[in-house]
Image: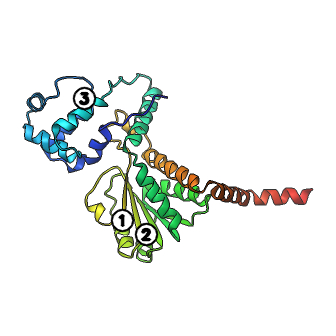
Amino acid sequence: MEEYEKTLIPVIESLYGSFTALEKKAADFFIHNTEKMDFSSKHIAGLLFISEATLSRFAKKCGFKGYREFIFQYEQNMEERKPLASNLAKQVLNCYQDLLNKTYALLDEGQVGRIVRAVSGSRRMYIYGCGSSGLAGMEMKLRFMRLGVPVEAITDIHIMKMNSVLLDENCLAVGISVSGKTQEVLRSLKAAKQNGAFTVLMTSARERRAGEFCDEIVLLAAREHLENGKAISPQFPILVMIDILYSRLLQADRRHRERLHEYTLDALNGGKQEREGKAK
């Protein structure tokens, strides 16, 4: 497998909804461009029929001091994109590889550590999600339970609303919404935060409003700009991030967590082992 590289593409995609119409023209260009060329602000502005001031504002929204700093970084990690093979299976696999690369580019190791500490320090953890995000939340529940985490996944919007107002400062609430627009999840996180809970949102859209009631916003790899995005499960970026959190949680107290994992497996196999013991 090729070495992962940090790129600006996932950052631009995560901010896409906050750009103006003219800034989106710049975003679309840098997302899809595969050629090395004259990236001076004058040339790109003329190419896109926008002003150099628009490029400067776009660069600043991406977290840079100005366009010159942005384009320096863009050129540093720019890769020549290879066209997808005609074989459908290869197209799908290439899309998954692209998602993995984007996940790595967005990964914040410090944030992962903070969330793991919040999980370890909480009395109980609740996961909110609807549809495919809810299914991913159920998988997260099963994984974390095996490490001894007291956790519950809630996919029913009515129970979600009732549960969120009962949380306190000893609880952790994780909301999963790839679009960042699932109102039931967002409202539940907001209610949980108002009651003192530590709140985490997993999403592919960086929304400023979510920062008002979320202690951590975990950015997932966006799918909108993948060439064959419709063939990819929307759960995939979520599951990758869950695995990263799971691995860090296991590593945090490996001996204790592994022992808990063995206990849960024994519990799952208890009926079979008991029957085998009686047979002997």
Residue 73: give x, y in percent of width and height: 26, 35
Q: Outermost residue toward the right?
A: 280
Estimate how packed mark 1 is, as few (under 14), some (14 to 19) or many (20 or more) residues with alpha carbons within 10 Å: many
Say above or below: 44 vs 14.
Answer: above
State the mark number for residue 101.
none
Check if mark 3's residue and mark 1's residue have beta carbons within 8 Å.
no
Residue flagged by tag 1: what amino acid is it? Glu
Q: Nearer the viewer, mark 2 or mark 3?
A: 3
Q: Earlier in the sequence, mark 2 or mark 1?
A: 2
Q: Earlier in the sequence, mark 3 or mark 1?
A: 3
Say above or below: 212 vs 11.
Answer: below
Residue 93: give x, y in percent of width and height: 46, 31
Check if mark 2's residue and mark 1's residue have beta carbons within 8 Å.
yes
Residue 154 appears in the figure: no
Residue tagged by mark 1?
A: 184
Residue flagged by tag 2: what amino acid is it? Met
Residue tagged by mark 2?
A: 160
